Image: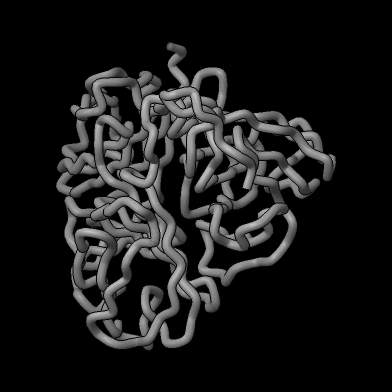
């Protein structure tokens, strides 16, 4: 039988949840999927208001928030972003210190993106202490070469460092910055001009990845057929833009124009829930949600419906991360439908 997918049921490893905040403690958010998922990596954005993105993981714990749109160090205070627990099928948020503060603001619409850490699904969370050494190898548990690495200094106010294997022809020589619009930058002080392997990734002396006496968190992803893909395409600046084949119907897509000063734009299959999928957030700002026609989500990929430089800049390399709602064809040969 043909190997259509390695994961028949993506809901076991990724789900999106939309909810309305109530600014009260103990607001339990239950995921909508048929499968239970206790998140190990949780990314929450208030869609209605200009509140920052909040990122949590099970390694650092519920009281430790990071912000994708800021260089800020990790905040260890429980009232900062107010996540109370990772639950067996969702999570619980509290009142927060400023009317919800990004995770539970009263009457505000929120999006939560939830991942399960699993080598099967190609996702590993690695915490380590920096030592300032040149050419240091950090072990991981993917048992495969990482295609995307996102690293944050938890101790100091330092930029997020991003590796993407399709960023340039030699991605280990470059890095991107999650908290800014910066184009890709050639800098050997980040990855030491050394490609990651199936067991380690290399860091150098940059404070973004290996500063002395600083603590770090890293999120590592490798593609799994029928479930995730991390690729690139060349922009055309045509509203009838390129089709990007993923081999599955996407549930979540993150786009970045690597060749221009443009933002990081996450999309999902629940905002607005129809084509063109026209609700856009910006991971490097605290802005509320935009409504503009950007892309179609299809049974085997997505198609760009914008001539905007952030999504389809002429001649530019645009990188993406994509995770599945459903494989195009499951392991039994049953095909998916377009949304």
- Residue 323: x and y in percent read 46, 40
Instruction: Identify the residue at horizontal 21%, vertical 29% (top origin).
Output: 140
Residue 300 appears at what percent x and percent y?
60, 33
Q: Is residue 194 left or right of residue 324?
A: left
Name the residue at 51% across, 19% down.
170
Residue 306 pos. (x, y %): 77, 48
Residue 293 image-quadrant placement: bottom right
Q: Nearer the viewer, residue 231 or 332?
A: 332
Coloration mode? one colour
Locate residue 270 relative to residue 221 in the image: left or right. Answer: right
Residue 191 in which image quadrant? top left
Left or right: where 303 falls relative to 280? right
Screen quadrant of the N terminus:
top left
Q: Nearer the viewer, residue 108 or 203?
A: 108
Which residue is more in the foreground, 306 or 207? 306
110 versus 37 height, above or below: below
67 over 266 or under it: above or below: below
Tell me which residue sits at (60%, 68%) in the image.
289
Q: Is residue 156 visible?
A: yes
Q: Is residue 190 visible?
A: no
- Vertical relation: 320 (above or below) 32: above
Asked if 305 appears above or below 3 in the picture, the reply is below
- The residue drawn where x is 72% and y is 42% is 304
Measured from the top left, where is residue 223 in percent x and y? 41, 28
């Amino acid at each position: 039988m043909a190997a259509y997918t390695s994961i028949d049921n993506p809901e076991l490893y990724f789900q999106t949840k939309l909810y309305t905040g109530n600014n009260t403690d103990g607001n339990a958010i239950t995921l909508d999927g048929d499968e239970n998922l206790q998140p190990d990596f949780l990314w929450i954005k208030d869609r209605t208001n200009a509140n920052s993105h909040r990122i949590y993981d099970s390694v650092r714990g519920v009281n430790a928030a990071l912000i994708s749109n800021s260089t800020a160090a990790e905040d260890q205070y429980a009232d900062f972003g107010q996540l109370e627990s990772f639950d067996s099928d969702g999570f619980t948020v509290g009142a927060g210190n400023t009317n919800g503060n990004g995770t539970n603001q009263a009457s505000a619409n929120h999006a939560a993106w939830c991942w399960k850490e699993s080598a099967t699904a190609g996702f590993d969370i690695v915490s380590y202490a920096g030592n300032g050494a040149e050419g240091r190898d950090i072990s991981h548990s993917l048992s495969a070469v990482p295609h995307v690495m996102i690293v944050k200094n938890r101790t100091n106010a330092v930029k997020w460092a991003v590796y993407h294997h399709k960023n340039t022809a030699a991605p280990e020589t470059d890095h991107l910055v999650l908290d800014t619009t910066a184009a890709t930058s050639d800098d050997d002080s980040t990855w030491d001009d050394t490609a990651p392997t199936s067991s380690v990734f290399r860091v150098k002396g940059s404070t973004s990845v290996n500063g002395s006496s600083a603590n770090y968190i890293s999120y590592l992803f490798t593609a799994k057929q029928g479930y995730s893909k991390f690729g690139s395409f060349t922009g055309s600046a045509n509203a009838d833009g390129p089709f990007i084949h993923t081999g599955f119907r996407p549930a979540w897509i993150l786009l970045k124009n690597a060749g221009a000063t443009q933002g990081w734009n996450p999309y999902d299959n629940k905002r607005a829930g129809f084509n063109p999928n026209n609700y856009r957030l910006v991971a490097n700002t605290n802005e509320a949600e935009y409504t503009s026609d950007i892309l179609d989500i299809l049974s085997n990929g997505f198609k760009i419906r914008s001539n905007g430089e952030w999504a389809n800049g002429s001649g530019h390399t645009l990188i993406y991360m994509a995770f599945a709602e459903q494989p195009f064809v499951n392991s039994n040969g049953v095909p998916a439908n377009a949304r």
